[in-house]
Image (spheres, rainbow, N blue to C red):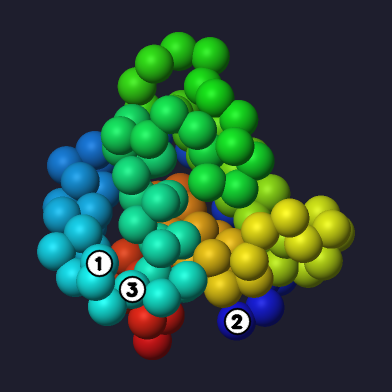
């Protein structure tokens, strides 16, 4: 998938419970996760506040806990930049695609979270 548009930051992300449930499902199957799946899990973990640093930029939040909608949208754009080659390929491409697809969902994109295989 080649990204073409960025989601606009929303005043509210998907509910924490919905993101946490997607993380629980993904984490239960993490042994079969490749680079894409690790991107999915990393993005979900970060979006729930369970990971301190962002999956692409490795920046730490100003406040502990779940990142705000603006910060999630910024991280989405960083993943999009990786996919488009504008960021110098600092992370693995499949990992970046997993983060991108997941954060698009977190920001209100597709109806369901991505699977660990990206299919």
Q: Where residue 74 sits in the image (x, y, percent)?
A: 64, 40
Classify residue 34 by image quadrant.
bottom left
Do the numbered discs 1 and 2 sit on residues whose CB atoms are within 8 Å? no
Residue located 19% across and 70% down the image:
29
Task: Tell which circle, 1 or 2, labels the residue nearer the N-terminal end.
Answer: 2
Q: Nearer the viewer, residue 43 or 101?
A: 43
Element at label 3: loop
Residue located 40% across and 40% down the image:
46
Residue depth check, mark 3 versus mark 2: number of the one nearer the observer: 3
Residue under circle 1?
A: 30
Taking 58 as reference, is 35 left or right? left
Classify residue 23 by image quadrant.
bottom left
Residue under circle 2?
A: 1
Q: Nearer the viewer, residue 9 or 78?
A: 78
Does 75 sit above or below residue 40?
above
Residue depth check, mark 1 versus mark 2: number of the one nearer the observer: 1
The N terminus lies in quadrant: bottom right
Q: Where residue 95 sits in the image (x, y, percent)?
A: 54, 65
Q: Is residue 18 visible?
A: no
> How far, Cα to Cα, is label 3 from label 1?
5 Å
Task: Tell which circle, 3 or 2, labels the residue nearer the N-terminal end.
Answer: 2
Do the numbered discs 3 and 1 sit on residues whose CB atoms are within 8 Å? yes
Q: Disc number at residue 33?
A: 3
């Amino acid at each position: 998938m080649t990204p073409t548009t960025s989601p606009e930051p929303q005043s509210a992300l998907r509910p924490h419970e919905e993101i946490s449930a997607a993380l629980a499902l993904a984490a239960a199957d993490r042994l079969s996760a490749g680079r894409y799946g690790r991107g999915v899990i990393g993005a979900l973990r970060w979006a729930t506040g369970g990971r301190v640093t962002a999956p692409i930029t490795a920046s730490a939040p100003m406040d502990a806990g779940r990142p705000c909608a603006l910060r999630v949208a910024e991280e989405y754009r960083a993943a999009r930049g990786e996919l488009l080659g504008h960021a110098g390929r600092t992370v693995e491409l499949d990992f970046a695609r997993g983060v991108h697809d997941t954060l698009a969902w977190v920001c209100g994109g597709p109806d369901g979270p991505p699977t660990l295989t990206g299919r």
